[in-house]
Image (cartoon, rainbow, N blue to C red):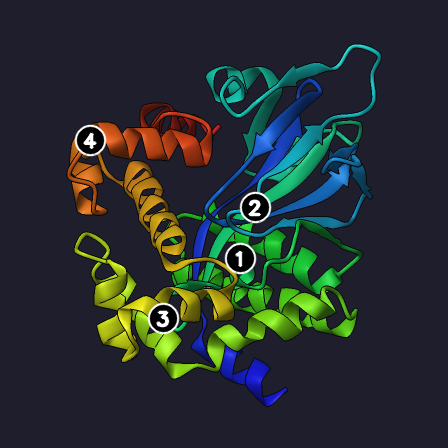
C-alpha cells in the first residue's frame, strides 16, 4: 500500500471537459479512441462497449483509460441501428448526440449520460491508467464518483461564481483516487497491477520518462536514453521493455502523438508547425504516422475535437 500511496501523491491531474449528453438516435462507433481518460455515467437508456457488447447499467460508469481503443454503441436496441466510426460520426455529430447544461433539460424518457474527460499523469510524465495496461471497464453503482462527475459538470457551467476551477480541480483529483480505490477494493486487474506497478519503482526509468517529456522535439534515440539511464546503448531498449512491456521508440512516438493531439485541440498552429514541435521535421511522415496511430488524418482530428463540443 505504501507504493500505491507514493504514486497517488505523485499524480498530476487535469480536468479536460464534462457535460450532459442526450442520444438522439442510436449509433455505433467502432473505433472510439482518446488520449484522455473518459468516464461515461449512464442515467437512462443504453450504452454497450467492446467486442462482446458489454452493457452498462443505469447508474453505472464506463471508464475508458487513455489510449485504449474500443467500440461503443450509444442508444437502445433497435432493428435498424445507425452505424458509424470515428471518421464519420464527428461530421454529423448533431444527428446523434446533443449536450445540455442541466440534466433537467432532458425528459425522463431520454437516453442520457454524463461525459467527463480527465488526464492523470504519474511523476508528471506517465499516463497513469494507460501505464497499468487495463482495459475499459464498468464502475458499478459508486455514489461518490457519480456525485463528483455531476458536480463537476454543474460547476463548469457556472458564471460569476468564485472558486469554480478550484472546485473542479478538487473533484477531478478525488475522482482519480476513487477510481483507483475501486480497482484495488474490487481486486480488478490484479496481474496487471502487480506487473506494471514496477514502472514507478525504478528511478532510472523515471529519469527516462522525464527526459522524454522535456525533450519531445529533440533527439530521443536509444543512444540519448542510454546516457540518461547510465546503461549501454545496446541494452537500453531491452531494459526499457522489460520494465514497461514496450520498446522505448514506441513509447516516444505515443508521447509525441499525444502532445500533437493536445496542440490540435488547444491551438491554431498548422499541421506542419505541430509536427515540428513534437519532433517530426518531415510533415508527410508525421501525417502518415498520425493516421496510422489514430485512424484519421490530423486535420480531421482537429475537426473532430471542435465538433465534439456539441
Mark closer to the observer (1, 3): 3
Distance CA(mark 3)–CA(mark 4): 31 Å
Q: Where is 310 relative to 174, above or below?
A: above
* Residue at which label 4 appears: 283
* Residue at which label 2 appears: 68
Mark closer to the observer (3, 4): 3
* Residue at which label 3 appears: 235
Percent position (x, y) of residue 109?
Answer: 80, 27
- Residue 30 versus residue 152: which sits nearer the camera? 30
Distance CA(mark 2)–CA(mark 3): 29 Å
Q: Is residue 182 left or right of residue 52?
A: left
Mark closer to the observer (2, 3): 3
Q: Residues within 10 Å of mark 2 (few under 14, many from 20)?
A: some
- Residue 219 versus residue 276: which sits nearer the camera? 219
Distance CA(mark 2)–CA(mark 4): 26 Å
Find residue 113 and report its image quarter: top right
Find residue 233 and report its image quarter: bottom left
- Residue 100 versus residue 66: which sits nearer the camera? 66
Q: Where is 70 relative to 211, above or below?
A: above
Residue at coordinates 49% horizontally, 54% vertically from top-left? 118
Q: Residues within 10 Å of mark 1 (few under 14, many from 20)?
A: some
Q: Where is 198 relative to 271, above or below?
A: below
Percent position (x, y) of residue 14?
Answer: 42, 59
Amino acid at each position: 500500500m505504501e507504493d500505491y500511496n507514493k504514486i497517488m501523491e505523485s499524480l498530476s491531474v487535469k480536468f479536460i471537459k464534462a457535460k450532459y449528453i442526450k442520444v438522439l438516435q442510436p449509433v455505433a462507433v467502432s473505433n472510439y479512441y482518446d488520449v484522455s481518460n473518459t468516464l461515461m455515467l449512464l442515467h437512462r437508456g443504453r450504452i454497450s462497449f467492446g467486442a462482446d457488447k458489454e452493457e452498462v447499467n443505469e447508474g453505472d460508469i464506463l471508464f475508458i483509460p487513455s489510449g485504449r481503443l474500443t467500440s461503443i454503441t450509444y442508444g437502445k436496441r433497435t432493428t435498424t441501428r445507425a452505424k458509424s466510426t470515428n471518421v464519420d460520426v464527428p461530421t454529423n455529430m448533431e444527428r446523434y448526440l446533443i449536450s445540455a447544461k442541466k440534466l433537467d433539460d432532458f425528459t425522463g424518457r431520454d437516453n442520457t449520460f454524463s461525459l467527463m474527460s480527465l488526464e492523470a499523469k504519474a511523476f508528471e510524465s506517465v499516463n497513469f491508467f494507460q501505464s497499468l495496461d487495463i482495459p475499459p471497464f464498468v464502475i458499478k453503482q459508486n455514489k461518490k464518483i457519480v456525485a463528483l462527475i455531476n458536480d463537476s459538470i454543474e460547476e463548469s457551467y457556472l458564471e460569476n461564481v468564485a472558486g469554480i476551477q478550484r472546485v473542479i480541480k478538487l473533484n477531478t483529483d478525488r475522482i482519480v483516487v476513487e477510481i483507483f480505490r475501486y480497482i484495488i477494493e474490487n481486486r480488478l486487474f490484479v496481474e496487471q497491477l502487480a506487473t506494471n506497478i514496477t514502472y514507478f519503482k525504478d528511478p532510472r526509468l523515471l529519469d527516462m520518462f522525464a527526459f522524454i517529456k522535456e525533450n519531445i522535439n529533440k533527439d530521443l534515440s536509444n543512444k540519448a536514453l542510454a546516457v540518461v539511464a547510465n546503461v549501454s546503448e545496446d541494452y537500453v531498449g531491452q531494459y526499457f521493455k522489460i520494465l514497461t512491456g514496450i520498446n522505448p521508440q514506441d513509447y516516444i512516438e505515443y508521447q509525441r502523438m499525444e502532445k500533437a493531439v493536445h496542440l490540435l485541440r488547444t491551438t491554431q498552429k498548422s499541421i506542419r508547425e505541430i509536427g515540428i514541435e513534437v519532433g517530426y521535421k518531415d510533415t508527410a511522415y508525421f501525417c502518415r504516422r498520425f493516421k496510422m496511430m489514430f485512424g484519421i488524418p490530423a486535420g480531421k482530428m482537429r475537426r473532430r475535437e471542435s465538433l465534439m463540443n456539441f
